[in-house]
Image: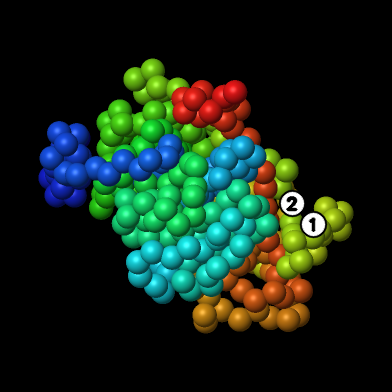
């Protein structure tokens, strides 16, 4: 707490939250239900994986619109990346996470995805131009200019002992979790932990059924796997490496890059086989020696909680 007192960033975010809490800064409310998926730390906690999970479940009944900022994209303003399952933009226009989600939901007529730095006008255009029935905001816990019906906040074990930036990697203090409607404890399959806060609903997120896929999206046989050079550019490269170790995937070398890395100076050696994440895989042209590790998400009870809270149950 003493460090927070001398941390200017702490006072900036506290004052900003005070203004929103007192309705002194404008908040725009979309016409459709809004679910925000976010966290309180810099780096990866599995937000995009949770957005993928919720989209897979909720798009069985509704036209789901996903809205992201489009971090590190080479474009400005609003762009529709995926329109009812049809890909409309490139990686450079979309940004890596938006393009990855669009890649996954190609062909699903109940999923659309857009990018916009300002979420409120972006949501308005998605309602008007795409006819979405539910809006999912990726990485929006701190983006308070748009109202939400549910605030789902992911926490990893390391967050509980961390400090606020720049003394640590927290975007906000743990006390900000009072704004959350539910907490999701991530990476339970590699770092299990328990945590509660003010009697808020708590769910645990597990990654399971890990599979290696080639550039044709075909699963690789788990028997006699080749030896890979593994690489990733994530907010938490350590968790990718921990999974490789846990799965006993043969790896001759591991290379870590900064989050959202562009890979323009990274050439694949045709005599080697490479393994990466889906987020990194989509940044490369199809190559027979490049593979990605993918998985399924399990969050017991969360879908039922969301459907009940938004009154989506029949």
Tell me the residue that label 1 is attached to. 219
Give the image quarter of residue 275.
bottom right
Residue 3: image quadrant is top left
Give residue 299's position: percent from left, percent from top.
59, 32
Q: Residues within 10 Å of mark 2 (few under 14, many from 20)?
A: some
The residue closer to the viewer here, 64 or 249, is 64
x%, y% of residue 172?
Answer: 28, 42
Q: Residue at x 41, y 74 (%)?
A: 74
Query: Depth check: 103 or 107 in front?
Result: 107
Q: Is residue 123 above or below residue 230?
A: above
Is residue 92 shown left or right of residue 268? Answer: left
Instruction: Give left or right: position of 311 versus 18.
Output: right
Q: Which element is circle 2 on?
A: strand
Q: Are marks 2 and 1 in contact (CB under 8 Å)?
A: yes
Q: Which residue corresponds to the image point at 79% horizontal and 60% vertical from the top-left?
A: 218
Q: Is 145 situated above or below 288?
A: above
Residue at left offset 25%, top offset 52%? 166
Of mark 2 and mark 1, the one earlier in the sequence is 2
In the image, is 242 to the left or to the right of 270?
Answer: left
Q: Which mark is residue 211?
A: 2
Position of residue 201 measured from the top left corner of the image (x, y, whole percent): 45, 22
């Amino acid at each position: 707490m003493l460090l927070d007192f001398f941390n200017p960033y702490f006072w900036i975010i506290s004052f900003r939250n005070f203004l929103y809490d007192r309705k002194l800064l404008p908040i725009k409310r979309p016409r459709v239900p809004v679910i925000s998926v976010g966290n309180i730390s810099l780096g990866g906690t599995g937000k995009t994986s949770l957005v993928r999970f919720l989209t897979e479940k909720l798009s069985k009944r509704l036209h789901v619109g996903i809205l992201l900022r489009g971090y590190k994209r080479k474009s400005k303003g609003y762009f529709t990346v995926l329109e009812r399952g049809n890909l409309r933009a490139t990686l450079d226009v979309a940004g890596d996470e938006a393009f990855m989600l669009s890649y996954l939901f190609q062909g699903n007529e109940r999923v659309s995805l857009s990018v916009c730095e300002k979420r409120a006008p972006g949501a308005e255009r998605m309602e008007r131009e795409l006819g979405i029935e539910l809006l999912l905001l990726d990485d929006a816990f701190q983006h308070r200019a748009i109202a939400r019906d549910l605030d789902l906040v992911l926490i990893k074990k390391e967050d509980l002992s961390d400090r606020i930036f720049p003394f640590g990697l927290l975007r906000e203090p743990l006390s900000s979790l009072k704004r959350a409607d539910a907490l999701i404890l991530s990476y339970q399959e590699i770092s299990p932990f328990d945590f509660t806060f003010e009697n808020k609903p708590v769910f645990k997120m597990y990654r399971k059924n890990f599979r290696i896929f080639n550039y044709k999206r075909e699963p690789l046989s788990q028997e006699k796997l080749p030896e890979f050079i593994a690489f990733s550019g994530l907010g938490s490269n350590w968790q990718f490496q921990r999974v490789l170790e846990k799965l006993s995937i043969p790896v001759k070398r591991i290379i870590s890059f900064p989050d959202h890395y562009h890979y323009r100076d990274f050439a694949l050696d045709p005599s080697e086989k490479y393994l990466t994440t889906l987020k990194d895989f989509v940044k490369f042209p199809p190559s027979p020696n490049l593979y990605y590790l993918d998985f399924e998400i399990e969050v017991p009870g969360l879908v039922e909680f969301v459907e009940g809270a938004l009154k989506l149950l029949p």
